[in-house]
Amino acid sequence: MNSAALRKDGRPLDSPAPQPQDAVLAYSIRGNVYLNITNLCTLACTFCPKFTDWMVHDYFLKLGRVEISAECVVAAARLATKNGRASRDQAEQALSRGEAIGGDLSSLGEVVFVGYGEPTRELQLLLRSAQLLREAGARRLRLDTDGLANLREGRDVTAELGAHFEAVSISINAHNPEVYLRHCPNRYGEQAWYACQDFIRAARKHFEYVQASVVGMPDVDREACRQLVEDELGVRFRYREFGGVG
Ligand code: SF4
């Protein structure tokens, strides 16, 4: 049998490359819904897949700079619960029709703000969306973050976040500031690594579940990271193999 070659996103190789309007705002994996509300980042991580293909599984996540409302985020989460994925345009169209969208958010394990961007870069959208998702039935909300919101905002926002989210996963990504800066270049320099630790300490007071994660780059000392996270910061440690997404 002659099968056509396919892109990673499931399209034939000779089809046009996906465009921002094709990008998913919400996508489903293993009984959770993941929300990709922004492509803005504080870091420019050397290991980030967005610098190559913007794909997670077969979901294309390059939104571009678009306005997104919290109502649109909730509509996308509902559509993804039913259909596996939803773009911003699909969510907007469903809202404009004014019909009940369906999609039982209470059936989900978690609703997770993650994607190829830092969710706290859109802090007000993040907080409002979390509030509306809860009102719409979501049982457990998780934030995946770089842990730099306090540094960027110039104030401690962990209580505001913890008021809406049960769980937070924070990318600490290195056992010392030199290695961190090598893999996570940013405008704050090595200060960001210390700020991330401060965020983790503050998060312990406001979230039920706090985890700090590391991507296994070759010069990252896994055991030193584990000691830092578990013994010094007192939260759960997650080690992710380099190249794994979703
Ligand atoms: S913070 Fe996340 S999305 Fe942003 S560059 Fe790093 S890995 Fe990529």
Image (cartoon, rainbow, N blue to C red):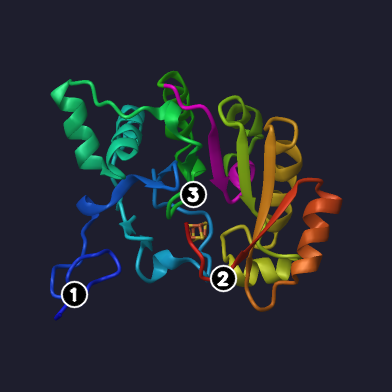
Q: Earlier in the sequence, mark 1 or mark 3?
A: 1
Q: Is residue 191 magenta?
A: no
**Residue 213: percent from the left, percent from the top?**
65, 56
Q: Which residue is mark 1?
A: 13
Q: Which-is-in-front pick, marks 1 and 3?
A: 1
Q: CA distance from mark 2 to mark 1?
A: 26 Å
Q: CA distance from mark 1 to mark 3?
A: 30 Å
- Numbered badge on residue 88: none
The stretch in magenta equals 137-151
- Could you tell me the amino acid type at mark 1? Leu
Which of 73/195 is in front? Answer: 73
Q: Which residue is mark 3?
A: 118
Task: In the rendered view, tell whether residue 69 sits above or below residue 42.
Answer: above
**Residue 159: percent from the left, percent from the top?**
65, 28
- Could you tell me the amino acid type at mark 2? Phe
Q: Is residue 211 left or right of residue 184?
A: right
Q: Does mark 3 have its CB less than 8 Å from ligand 1?
A: yes
* Residue at 51% over, 66% down: 244
Q: Which residue is mark 2?
A: 242
Which of 176/134 is in front? Answer: 134
